[in-house]
Image (cartoon, grey):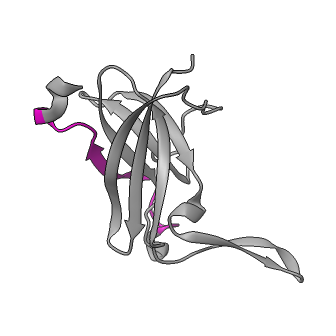
Amino acid sequence: MPSRRTLRLTFRSSKDGVELLSVEQVEMTTPPQPGQRPQAGKNGGHWFELREEKGGVLAHRLIDDSVLNSVEVHSPDGPPQRLFGGMRNIVFEVLLPDMEGARTVTLVGNPLEPQDRRKEPSRDLATFELFPRDREENR
């Protein structure tokens, strides 16, 4: 069931990691996220999970690896390849439903360091508090 309230989360990625810049509550239908929710340790790639206080996942949003640290290279001599390097310096947005009980958003996926990418399974990479406790009563 699509949510009619959406959180527009603005992030910055850089060599220092990923940082949550802002959380905006907007009146719009949240775009659907088709397919099953990926699971840390089992699936690869990167995604954000909207979590409740006890850690339960309320919603998720897949993101393209090219946002963080990869490029797709095309060659006339072979198939396209995805190459991983250092973190890109970029600002990007993620849309998640604005759900009752949402407390944090967590970036989940393969390690961001290229040398660790294939050695370690996907896991929680960073967790961000959506609404600091002192602002909660204004929500």
Tell me the magenta residue range.
117-134
How many labels were placed on the picture?
Answer: 0
Observer-nearest of 26 and 122? 26
Q: Using the rendered image of the protein, determine whether residue 39 is visible from the camera's viewpoint.
A: no
For image coordinates 55% across by 54% down, the residue present is 45
In the shown orientation, is residue 77 left or right of residue 93? right
Query: Where in the figure is residue 86, as x and y percent of width and height?
Result: 47, 77
Q: Using the image, determine if residue 132 lies above or below residue 87.
A: above
Q: Position of residue 107 (x, y in %)?
A: 40, 49
Quarter where residue 50 is shown: top left
Q: Indicate whether residue 115 is drawn in magenta.
A: no
Residue 108 lies, with reference to residue 137, above or below; the image says below
Q: Residue furthest top?
A: 1
**x and y percentages locating residue 52 in the rendered image:** 30, 27
Considering only vertical position in the picture, is 137 above or below 12? above
For the C terminus, give its image quadrant. Answer: top left
The N terminus appears in which quarter of the rendering? top right
**Res. 82 visible in picture:** yes
Q: Quick check: is 132 in the magenta stretch?
A: yes
Residue 78 horizontal side relative to residue 103, left or right: right
Q: Residue furthest left?
A: 134
The image position of residue 6, as x and y in percent, is 46, 30
- Quick one: which residue is furthest to the front in this view? 27
Q: Quadrant of residue 36?
A: top right
Relative depth, front residue between 11 and 84 = 11
Residue at (35, 66) in percent of width and height: 17
Residue located at (89% from left, 82% from top): 76
